[in-house]
Image (cartoon, rainbow, N blue to C red):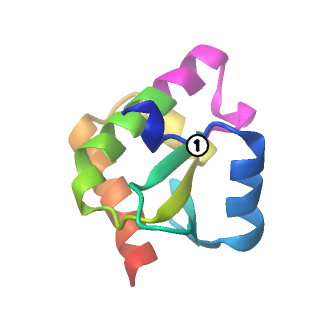
Amino acid sequence: MQRRNRLSRSRDFDAVYRHGRSVSTRFLVLYWFPREGQDEPRLGIAVPKGSGSAVDRNRVKRRLREAWRERLPQVPAGRDYVLIARPALGETLQTQDAAWLGVRVDEVLGKASA
């Protein structure tokens, strides 16, 4: 995922949390906030410390970024997103493949667009 498609500053995350809307599933929570203009969507990923060691959390982030990148053409433009992994996701990903994670991301995106 390219840098222009990522949220990196704390104030960007805060704006999405404070002023955005959210939907959740068993494994993921998605916040989104409309931005000015019709730029490409940007994503921030948060994985809480309760999800495991730093190695485990980074592995979850990498897999989420890849699942998001594959779906980028279908994601509505002009929004910032924050995808939060719930602790159960890290454990489940040890036994599941990328297709399973893609279905979970599609599920939360579907709820957000409804």
Q: Name the secondary structure under disc 1.
A: loop
Task: From the top left corner, tell me how far across and down residue 54 is, in percent.
Answer: 65, 17
Does the segment drawn in magenta span residue 55?
yes
Does the segment drawn in magenta span residue 21?
no
Q: Which residues are magenta?
A: 46-60
Chief SS of the magenta region: helix
Q: Front-most of 64 and 5?
A: 5
Residue shown at 48% from the left, 50% from the top: 42
Q: Where is 5 relative to 111, above or below?
A: above
Q: Where is 64 relative to 16, above or below?
A: above
Say few, some or many: other residues with alpha carbon within 10 Å of mark 1 (under 14 / 14 to 19 / 20 or more).
Answer: some
Q: Where is 19 relative to 66, above or below?
A: below
Task: From the top left corner, tell me how far across and down residue 68 is, in percent.
Answer: 35, 46
Residue shown at 47% from the left, 23% from the top: 59
Please, which residue is most extreme toward the top here? 55
Badge 1 is on which residue? 7
What amino acid is found at the position of numbered circle 1 in the picture? Answer: Leu
Q: Front-most of 77 and 113?
A: 77
The part of the image, by quadrant, that contains residue 7 is top right
Q: Front-most of 20 and 30?
A: 20
Q: Which quadrant would the C terminus be assigned to in this image?
A: bottom left
Left or right for 38, reference 61 = left
Left or right for 60, reference 19 = left
Residue 92 visible (yes or no)? no
Task: From the top left corner, tell me how far across and down residue 41 is, in percent.
Answer: 42, 56
Q: Which quadrant would the N terminus be assigned to in this image?
A: top left
Left or right for 103, reference 92 = left
The part of the image, by quadrant, that contains residue 95 is top left
Residue 9 visible (yes or no)? yes
Task: From the top left corner, tell me how far across and down residue 75 is, in percent.
Answer: 32, 62
Number of numbered discs visible in the structure rendering: 1
